[in-house]
Image: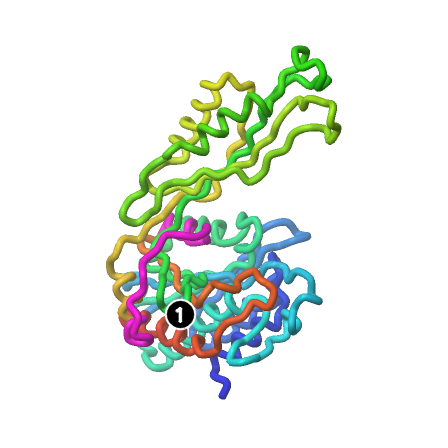
């Protein structure tokens, strides 16, 4: 029997909201929330040819701005489908097979969004006068560049003097079973493009050229072997990885004039972007390279230590599933990095992530109602 949560998941999946196109998902959600007394504001940022749609919806509790505010955060955009012919069923036609719901966004993250909405609906209907407040922060720019979405809404909220006390981001964090893992932080991401200059020349006359690959190789070996930090109780050690290396003209008899290396740090709270930049460039200077680096800070690490929010969510998961979730900071970045700037307690929790971004993305239907119930129990624990 289809539940209200499942029906909403299906409605959202049927909307082809490939980033940054929201495809009407947020309008559907705003209509439902508005009927419950939420004040809904649509915020559009970005270029006219590819605008980003964001939704801020809030329902104040009996204590108004004095009561705690819990924010459900997420995204309505999805990644491109990939080759349609490789899908067993159309990615934007929600399809059931063997207890699973298939479609793009089922796991990342329309199931979480739907579960949050229905949890809020049930909570408000059961307890129309509640002390704390509940809000939604949704964007259509999480799977894209992430420059006109949550980060812009957070800036807008900060300018308004909005205080956020708790935030649950609906990222798919579970591994094997719903509730086995929540993310109470994320590592920072610092990328760089290194250009090492040499002197192009004929490969038979190396004394008339300078090969940047030969000069770069010892530095790369040292950087790859460097221990950047040892991590801590919440974060694994910082890692440095090369993602791309380009050099040469394609001809086999030409020494290249430059080598280009793309790399990335995933760093813990034990390191800073400034410190990592200085340490890396110190290695380059020590090897005598003629270089320049273009740096891009994707996000600083954030951490919510065990406390009110983690305890409430952990207890809700235990009551609903019998599991005690592992707290983890592994994985990629999320919009939690932006929200953490103005919210002291940010965690991520959602369904298993094994099929996210894949062909035949799906979610186990048996997890959908328990996920909604976990969100509702957390609301009851924190703002009732």
Q: Is residue 338 above or below residue 31?
A: above
Q: Nearer the viewer, residue 345 or 177?
A: 177
Q: Is residue 335 magenta?
A: yes
x then y, percent, for residue 288: 50, 16
Q: Which residue is mark 1?
A: 177
x then y, percent, for residue 69: 33, 62
Residue appearing at x 59%, y 25% in the figure:
213
Quadrant in which residue 124 is drawn: bottom left
Q: Nearer the viewer, residue 345 or 283?
A: 283
The residue furthest bottom is 1
Per the image, label 1 sits on a secondary structure element best described as loop
26 left or right of 226? right
198 left or right of 368? right
x then y, percent, for residue 222: 44, 28
Colour scheme of this structure image? rainbow
Q: Quadrant of the C terminus?
A: bottom left
Residue appearing at x 40%, y 27% in the figure:
279
Magenta range is 317-342
Q: Is residue 186 magenta?
A: no
Residue appearing at x 60%, y 50% in the figure:
46
Q: Is residue 305 visible?
A: yes
Quadrant in which residue 315 is drawn: bottom left
Q: Nearer the viewer, residue 233 or 131?
A: 233
Q: Is residue 163 visible?
A: no
x then y, percent, for residue 68: 29, 62
Q: How many circles with numbers are drawn on the protein? A: 1
Q: Is residue 275 above or below residue 241?
A: above
The residue furthest top is 207
- Graded by Cα atoms within 10 Å as few (under 14), some (14 to 19) or many (20 or more), the crowding at tag 1 reads some
């Amino acid at each position: 029997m289809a539940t209200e949560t499942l029906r909403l998941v299906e409605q959202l999946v049927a909307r082809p909201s490939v980033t940054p196109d929201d495809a009407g998902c947020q309008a559907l959600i705003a209509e439902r929330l508005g009927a419950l007394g939420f004040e809904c504001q649509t915020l559009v940022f970005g270029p006219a040819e590819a605008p980003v749609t964001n939704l801020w919806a809030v329902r104040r509790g009996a204590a108004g701005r004095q009561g705690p505010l819990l924010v459900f955060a997420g995204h309505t955009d999805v990644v491109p489908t990939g080759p349609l012919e490789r899908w067993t069923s159309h990615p934007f036609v929600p399809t059931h097979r063997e207890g699973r719901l298939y479609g793009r966004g089922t796991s990342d993250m329309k199931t979480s969004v739907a579960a949050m909405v229905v949890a809020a609906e049930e909570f408000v209907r059961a307890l129309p006068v509640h002390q704390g407040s509940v809000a939604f922060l949704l964007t259509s720019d999480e799977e894209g560049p992430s420059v006109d979405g949550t980060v812009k809404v957070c800036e807008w909220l900060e300018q308004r003097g909005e205080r956020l006390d708790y935030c649950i981001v609906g990222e798919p964090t579970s591994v094997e079973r719903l509730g086995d893992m929540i993310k109470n932080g994320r590592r920072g991401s610092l990328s760089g493009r290194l250009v090492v200059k040499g002197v192009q020349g004929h490969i038979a006359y190396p004394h008339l050229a300078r090969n940047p690959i030969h000069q770069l190789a010892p530095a790369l070996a040292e950087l790859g072997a460097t221990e950047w930090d040892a991590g801590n109780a919440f974060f694994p050690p910082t890692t440095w990885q090369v993602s791309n290396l380009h050099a040469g003209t394609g001809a086999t008899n030409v020494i290249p004039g430059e080598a280009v290396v793309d790399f990335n740090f995933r760093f813990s709270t034990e390191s800073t972007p400034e410190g990592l930049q200085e340490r890396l460039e110190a290695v380059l200077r020590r090897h005598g390279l003629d270089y320049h680096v273009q740096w891009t800070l994707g996000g600083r690490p954030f951490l919510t230590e065990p406390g009110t929010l983690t305890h409430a969510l952990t207890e809700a998961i235990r009551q609903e599933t019998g599991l005690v979730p592992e707290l983890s900071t592994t994985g990629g970045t999320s919009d939690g990095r932006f929200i953490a700037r103005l919210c002291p307690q940010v965690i991520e929790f959602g369904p298993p992530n094994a099929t996210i971004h894949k062909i035949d993305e799906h979610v186990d239907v048996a997890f959908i109602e328990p996920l909604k119930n976990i969100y509702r129990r957390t609301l009851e624990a924190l703002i009732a």
